[in-house]
Image: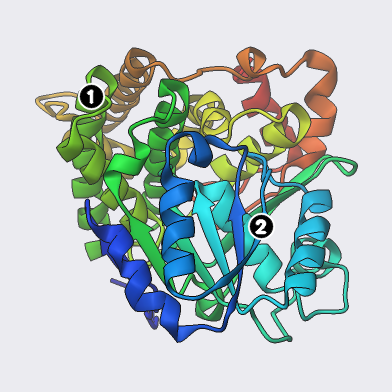
Amino acid sequence: MIGNFTYCNPTKLYFGKDALNGLNEELPKYGKNVLLVYGGGSVKKNGIYDKVLAALKANGKTVFEDGGVMPNPTSEKLKEGIARARAAKADLILAVGGGSVCDYAKAVSVSVNCDDDAWDKYFIRFDDVTCDIVPVGCVLTMVGTGSEMNGGSVITNREQKLKIGHVFGENVFPKFSILNPEYTFTLPKYQMISGIYDIMSHILEQYFSGTDDNTSDYIMEGLLRSLIHSANIAVQNPKDYEARSNIMWIATWALNTLVAKGKTTDWEVHMLGQAVGAHTDATHGMTLSAVSMPYYRYILPYGTAKFARYAVNVWDVAPSDKSEKQIAEEGLLAMENWMKKIGLVMNITDLGATADMLDGIVDSTRIMTGGYKTLDKNDIRAVLRASY
């Protein structure tokens, strides 16, 4: 491994069928007023809301609600949440839902005591947090983002056609997260598959960087093999507890900052996907799957050795007497076939993107460094055209 780094992750996890009991240990640590944040109402239909509310009341909390958080939370909704948290004088924000709800809760938490416009401060200027933070806890009902154990927050500005993520420091990480794999059982198949690919993309965007012998790469290869194996099972039987628990655990470790250590990382797939999402409001994981194969084939010539290693160590491509490039291409083909098999979206047209959106999507795509090739706007356009 090359370079210096520090590592700290302050989030406490409660995992398994009895994980919700962790609320009884955590809630007494915080003040009386709790802002309960959730999405479109599925948590009420599946009974999770009632269980959480009962725990809050049993611990003597005054509950204020902020429902209706959408899959791609908007800057307008963020303003509403900030106002609700201020009115509640929230001592704790408890997010019950998937990654978007957790992301949103963190964005609210860093903005409640800040006079600046939250969108401008955190998602345009990328300022550090300079005000008191309201602590966040999470009860996870969908896996994919890893938001339950990191400082990431993604917000969409519909007017500006921008979807931007701010990765905050460890002071913004959730203080605790409740992870019960059974809470993911009622998720529609489309959403489950989307989350699975979000996990895969998190791992790959860290894996495809650097050329040193990095321990993080070995960890990521193991995570990928486990994800592929468990995803194959979960697609056939969504209520297979072992498969769903593995997927939930992989999602957490894919993006809790551990495997990024010693890596430069390449987040261009996310930038492309988020730009598509800003213009179509499509499901996040599917925007990533739609642009991934064109992107990876575009940069393969610049990182052929790593793509060949990926083919052999993750997809079991036999090296034999093939060239490094042939091995790398076979690996991407194996990945593409698997993506189609489990039902992922493979082009942005199927997500509602049209030819007249192309210029806007290009303009909305941030250019990242750290990967095997730093793209320019012409490269971005070529990748997007290949993803139609």
Q: Is residue 305 left or right of residue 106?
A: left
Image quadrant where residue 62 sits: bottom right
Amino acid under label 2? Glu
Q: Give the total number of marks visible in the rendering.
A: 2
What mark, if any, has residue 65 been given in the picture?
Answer: 2
Q: In which quarter of the image is the N terminus?
A: bottom left
**Secondary structure category for the residue under label 2:** strand
Q: Which colour scheme is used?
A: rainbow
Q: Which residue is drawn at 53% across and 33% down?
A: 288
Query: How crowded is the residue under tag 2: few (<14 C-alpha within 10 Å), some, or many (20+)?
Result: some
Residue 132 is tagged as none
Of residues 250 and 223, the one drawn nearer to the viewer in this rendering: 250
Residue density around tag 1, few if under 14, some if 14–19, many if 20 or more, within 10 Å: some
**Which residue was labeled with disc 1?**
232
Eyeballing the image, is 90 above or below 249?
A: below
* Relative side of 199 to 213, left or right: right
Residue in the image at 55% along x and 40% along y? 269
The reply to whether residue 267 is visible in this rendering is no
State the quadrant of the C terminus.
top right
Instruction: Judge left or right: residue 90 versus residue 246.
Output: right
99 to 198, vertically: above or below: below
Q: What residue type is labelled 1?
A: Asn
Residue 323 image point, x, y percent: 23, 27
Q: Position of residue 124 (x, y in %)?
A: 81, 62
Residue 123 lies, with reference to residue 71, above or below; the image says: below
> Residue 361's x, y, as percent?
77, 32
